[in-house]
Image (spheres, helix red, strand yellow):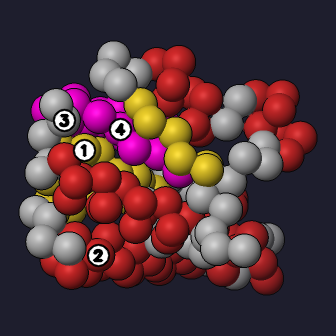
Amino acid sequence: MYTNILLPTDGLGKCQYGTCHGVLLAKDLGAKVTAVCVTEKLSSQEILKIYNPEMLFGTSAGKTAQESMKRAEDLHKELAGKALAVAEKMCVDNGVKCDKVYLAGESPTDGILKVAKEKNCDLIFISTHGNPGLMGTLFGTMATKILSHSKIPVLVHHCGGPS
């Protein structure tokens, strides 16, 4: 039925259980996993606030901003590598083939849909914690956006983790 399951991951907390469930589904179906981690591009102002707040008003802010952006990009890449390594290990432990994709500078929704199309995935397995908060309620959660824009089937998993 499904042969290539797209498994978005950020490697965070309870949603590792969602990754595990996605891998187990792939194993049961004899499918491969395309694990994807998408990181958004931060603006220069956001990076300066996070990494170098004292330089917001300095005269050498341009060079500092570039260095801070490089550090932020490196950190994103490192965190994505760790998240993808977790998914890959789960796949290896369960005998499931795994392709890893890191996409930087995209919105998570757009990146996930882009990778699903490029890698010819036939199912998106997405985990959600089911608590959208105010912003999710007002503007829609990533899961909701993927459900409404995807041209392929989407399976939404509640990743509450063990009780």
Question: What residue is rendered at 22% in x and 31% in y?
Answer: 122
Q: Which is nearer the N-term, disc 2 or disc 1? A: 1
Determine the CA span between mark 3 and mark 4.
Answer: 10 Å
**What residue range appears in magenta?**
109-127
Q: Which of 132 and 93 is in front in this view?
A: 93
Residue type at mark 2 is Met
Q: How far apart are marks 3 and 2 (CA)?
A: 19 Å
Residue tagged 3: 2
Helix, strand or loop status at disc 2: helix
Residue under label 4: 124
Disc 4 residue type (three-letter): Ile
Q: Which residue is nearer to you in this view: 113 or 50?
A: 113
Q: Furthest residue to the right?
A: 134
Residue 112 appears in which quarter of the rendering? top left
Q: How far apart are marks 1 and 3 (CA)?
A: 7 Å
Q: Which residue is drawn at 66% across and 80% down?
A: 51
Q: What element carries label 4?
A: strand
Residue 118 image offset from top left, x and y in percent = 16, 34
Q: Inspect the magenta stretch and tell me whether residue 115 lies in it.
A: yes
First reached walking from the N terminus: tag 4 or tag 1: 1
Mark 1 sits on what residue? 5
Pinpoint residue 105: horizontal percent, then vertical percent.
41, 50
Image quadrant for the N terminus?
top left
Location of mark 2 (residue)? 90
